[in-house]
C-alpha cells in the first residue's frame, strides 16, 4: 500500500488528471459536491394546484405485457390524474393486447391501438399522438412505475412556456435481482440523479429518457413527432434545443424501470445507446464542431460535456493504457491498482452523499456493488463504449440496429447506401 501511494505521489499531475478524466468517478464527486453546496437538489415541492395542463399518457409496447398492468396502476394512482391513457400494442406476440384490453374494460385505459406488425417505438408514439387531446404528452415504457407525485411534478416544469420537453428521475426497480442490476442502480444514481441535476441547472440537458418523457403536444405534433430511426429520444431532444426550446430534467419526479439482468443484455443495450448517440450527435447534428453559429451557451456546454467527458476519454483509453506501460513498465499494474483504491474511496464517498441528497435507501447489496463500481463504470462500460464508438465510426453499425424493425431500416437507409 505504501509503495502504491509513493508511486502516485511521484507521478506527473497530468497523468493523474487524465486518469480522473478517463475513469469518470471524480466527475460525479464534482456534481454531488456542487449540489450539496448550492442546496439545489431540495427544491420547493410543486403544488399540484399550480399545474394547469392536462396530460395524455402514451404507452408504446412490444411484448411488454408482463409489466403493463403495474405501470397502468401506478399511473392511475397519481395526484395529477391523466386525462387519458393510450396503449399501443406494436405487433406483440405475448399477452400485451389482452392485458391492455382488460385494462380498457375496467376503465383504466381509454384507448388501445393495435399494430398488426411491429412498426417501432417512434411510429407507435406518433400514431397515438394523433388521437391525444391533452396539453402534454407523457411517453412511458411498459415497465415504468411512477411514484404518486411524479406526473404532477413533471408537468409543473411546463408552467414555463419555453419548456417543450422534460424527463424524470429514474431508479432501477429490479436492483436486487443480480449484480448487474445492482451496479446499474448505483450508476443511475450517479449519472442520472446527480449528473443530470447539475446539467439541468446550467441548461445542458441533451437527452430526454425513453422510459419517461413529457412533451408539449402542440410542439410535438408541429414537429412531426419522433424520428423513426435509431436514437429517437436523443434526436428529438436535440431538435427541440436547436429550435430554441428548453429541455428540462425534474429530479424530484421519480419513476422506476427494470434494467437488464445479465451482462450480455446490458452490453447490447449500451452498445445501441452509444452507437445511436454518436451517429445522431455527429452525423445528423454536426456537434463535433467547437462552435455553431448563433449557438446559445447552454447548447455549447451540452456538446462539450459529451465531447470532453465522454467521447475523448473513451477513445483515448487504450492509448492511455499503452502510455502507462511505456511510462511505468512492470509498475503499470501497481499504478492502476493504486488508482483503483483511490477511486474506490471516492466512489464510496459519492454513494453516501448521493443517498443523502436524493433521499434513497441503501442496503448491503448496494454497498457490496459499490466495491466494484469503479471497475464497472471506468473499465467495463468504458471498454464497451470504445468498441461501440469504433464500430460506428468504421462500419456505421447503427444502421443495423434491431431496435428498429427491418422494413423501417430498409426504408430509412435505402437511398444512403
Image (cartoon, helix red, strand yellow):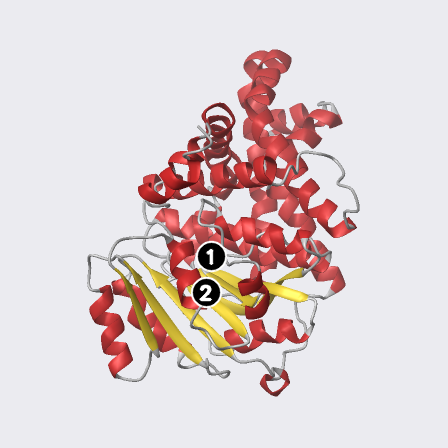
Quadrant in which the N terminus is drawn: top right
In this view, the residue in front, 26 or 235, is 235
**Residue at the image point whose x is 53% and y is 66% from the top:** 214
Q: Which residue is labeled 1 in the image?
A: 210
**Residue at the image point whose x is 33% and y is 78% from the top:** 109
The x, y position of residue 128, in whole percent, is: 40, 67
Q: Is residue 126 above or below residue 52?
A: above
The x, y position of residue 47, in whole percent, is: 62, 84
In this view, the residue in front, 82 or 143, is 82
In this view, the residue in front, 355 or 262, is 262
Crowding near the residue tagged with mark 2, few <14, some 14–19, many ≥20 C-alpha atoms within 10 Å: many
Whether residue 167 is visible: no
Task: Tell me whether circle 1 and circle 2 mark residues in contact (CB < 8 Å).
Answer: yes
Q: Please tell me whether mark 1 sits on a helix, a strand or a loop.
A: loop
Query: Mark 1 vs mark 2: which is more N-terminal?
Result: 2
Crowding near the residue tagged with mark 1, few <14, some 14–19, many ≥20 C-alpha atoms within 10 Å: some
Q: Is residue 42 above or below residue 123?
A: below
Q: Please tell me whether mark 2 sits on a helix, a strand or a loop.
A: strand
Quadrant in which the C terminus is drawn: top left
What number is the disc on residue 229? none
Q: Can you tell which quarter of the image residue 250 is in?
A: bottom right
Q: Residue furthest bottom?
A: 49
Q: Which residue is labeled 2 in the image?
A: 139
The x, y position of residue 413, in whole percent, is: 43, 36
**Residue at the image point whose x is 44% and y is 72% from the top:** 57
**Residue at the image point whose x is 53% and y is 21% from the top:** 333
The alpha-carbon separation of the residues under discs 1 and 2 comes to 7 Å
Q: Is residue 44 above or below residue 225?
A: below
Amino acid at each position: 500500500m505504501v509503495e502504491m501511494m509513493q508511486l502516485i505521489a511521484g507521478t506527473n499531475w497530468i497523468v493523474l488528471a487524465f486518469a480522473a478524466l478517463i475513469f469518470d468517478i471524480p466527475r460525479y464527486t464534482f456534481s454531488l459536491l456542487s449540489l450539496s453546496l448550492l442546496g439545489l437538489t431540495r427544491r420547493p415541492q410543486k403544488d399540484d394546484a399550480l399545474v394547469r395542463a392536462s396530460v395524455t399518457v402514451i404507452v408504446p409496447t412490444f411484448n411488454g405485457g408482463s409489466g403493463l398492468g403495474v405501470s397502468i396502476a401506478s399511473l392511475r394512482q397519481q395526484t395529477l390524474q391523466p386525462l387519458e391513457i393510450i396503449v399501443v400494442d406494436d405487433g406483440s406476440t405475448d399477452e400485451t393486447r389482452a392485458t391492455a384490453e382488460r385494462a380498457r374494460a375496467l376503465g383504466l385505459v381509454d384507448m388501445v391501438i393495435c399494430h398488426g406488425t411491429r412498426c417501432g417505438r417512434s411510429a407507435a408514439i406518433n400514431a397515438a399522438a394523433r388521437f391525444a387531446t391533452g396539453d402534454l404528452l407523457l411517453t412511458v415504457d411498459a415497465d415504468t412505475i411512477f411514484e404518486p407525485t411524479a406526473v404532477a411534478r413533471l408537468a409543473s416544469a411546463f408552467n414555463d412556456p419555453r419548456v417543450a420537453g422534460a424527463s424524470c428521475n429514474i431508479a432501477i426497480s429490479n436492483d436486487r435481482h443480480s449484480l448487474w442490476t445492482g451496479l446499474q442502480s448505483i450508476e443511475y444514481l450517479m449519472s442520472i440523479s446527480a449528473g443530470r441535476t447539475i446539467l439541468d441547472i446550467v441548461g445542458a440537458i441533451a437527452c430526454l429518457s425513453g422510459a419517461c418523457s413529457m412533451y408539449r403536444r402542440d410542439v410535438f405534433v408541429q414537429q412531426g413527432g419522433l424520428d423513426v430511426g435509431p436514437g429517437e429520444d436523443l434526436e428529438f431532444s436535440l431538435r427541440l434545443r436547436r429550435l430554441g426550446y428548453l429541455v428540462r430534467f425534474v429530479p424530484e419526479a421519480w419513476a422506476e424501470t427494470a434494467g437488464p439482468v445479465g451482462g450480455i443484455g446490458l452490453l447490447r443495450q449500451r452498445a445501441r445507446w452509444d452507437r445511436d448517440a454518436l451517429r445522431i450527435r455527429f452525423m445528423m447534428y454536426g456537434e463535433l464542431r467547437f462552435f455553431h453559429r448563433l449557438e446559445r451557451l447552454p447548447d455549447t456546454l451540452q456538446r462539450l460535456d459529451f465531447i470532453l467527458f465522454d467521447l475523448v476519454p473513451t477513445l483515448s483509453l487504450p492509448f492511455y493504457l499503452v502510455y502507462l506501460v511505456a511510462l511505468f513498465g512492470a509498475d503499470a499494474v501497481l499504478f492502476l491498482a493504486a488508482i483503483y483504491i483511490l477511486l474506490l474511496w471516492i466512489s464510496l464517498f459519492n454513494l453516501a452523499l448521493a443517498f443523502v441528497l436524493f433521499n434513497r435507501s441503501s442496503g448491503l447489496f448496494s454497498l457490496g456493488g459499490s466495491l466494484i463500481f469503479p471497475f464497472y463504470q471506468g473499465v467495463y462500460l468504458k471498454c464497451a463504449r470504445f468498441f461501440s464508438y469504433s464500430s460506428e465510426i468504421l462500419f456505421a453499425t447503427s444502421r443495423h440496429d434491431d431496435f428498429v424493425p427491418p422494413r423501417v431500416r430498409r426504408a430509412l437507409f435505402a437511398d444512403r447506401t
